[in-house]
Amino acid sequence: MDVNSVLARSLEPIRTRSGTRVSVAVLEPRNGRRAVYGSHVHVTASLVKVDILAALLLHAQRERRALTRWEASTAASMIQSSDNASASVLWRRIGGGRGLTDANRALGLTSTQAGPGPNWGLTRTTAADQLALLSAVFEDHSPLNGASRDLIQSLMGQIDAEQNWGVSAAGSRWQLKNGWLQRPHSQRWAINSMGRVKAHGSTFYLVILSHGSRSMSHGISAVEQAAQSAVHALCSTPPPVSPIIR
């Protein structure tokens, strides 16, 4: 059984038990092995704050400058404390949805639609696109230069203690960003988490997007189960054997 099938089988009980729909993408960068489950488009909620910061840094790179002291302080509040006012200010700074779309074109995100007007939290994305964003944040071959990547990584590694949930359940030495939003029409929750974790002697980039949870706590539980299942799927499935060419 291939790794995608193993992952799909392990995730099915989450929907059965909780009614939560999840999409998952996981990559083990040392060998390029990955698994993806679900191509649904999900609302990002605060997950988009990493994308906003990446867009801000690309803008500064084009101007051949570092972030101003104010920009750096506002970015820290946006990522570490998930401060919404800071996100709104920087959303305007990057040019709103148009600026995010331009940045995502450079970052290799192809299925992300910026939120309308000032509503950055209603940006819609896929797990595969957010995995591409993580690769841009953590890999050397990236439109983001070393200083920009170091800043994002540092902030994602210093999240406020009450937000230490999600992909961190799958391992240790994490760097992450979470997002959560109760949808007004259904009263159900969108709960998302993405980041880099150490587990089983390796490093993993991990994205969990979800919607339909009846409470925030149930959504977090589903996301953490999915994160653990994703890492286990890669670790427990042997890599395909290359054919011998004679």
Image (cartoon, rainbow, N blue to C red):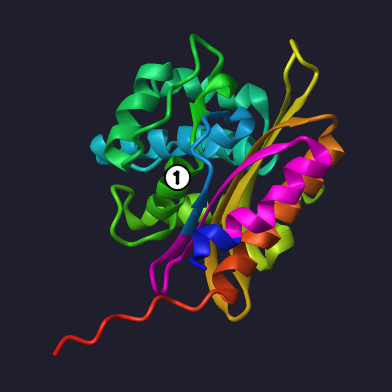
- Residue at x 32%, y 53% (from the top left corner): 145
- Rendered position, 51 above or below 13: above
- Residue at x 51%, y 58% (from the top left corner): 4
Does the segment drawn in magenta span residue 17? yes
Numbered disc total = 1
Q: Is residue 207 visible?
A: yes
- Residue at x 57%, y 33% (from the top left corner): 74
Residue 148: x and y, percent? 40, 50
Please name whichever residue, 17 or 48, is drawn nearer the observer in this view of the structure: 17
Magenta extent: 7-34
* 27 relative to 15 in the view: left or right: left
- Rendered position, 26 above or below 58: below
The residue where tag 1 is placed is 128
- Rendered position, 188 above or below 72: above
> Disc 1 residue type?
Ala
Q: Is residue 157 visible?
A: no
Name which quarter of the figure residue 18 lies in. Answer: top right
Residue 230: x and y, percent? 61, 60
Please name whichever residue, 36 or 89, is drawn nearer the observer in this view of the structure: 36
SS for callout 1 = helix
Does the segment drawn in magenta span residue 4? no
Residue 100: x and y, percent? 39, 26
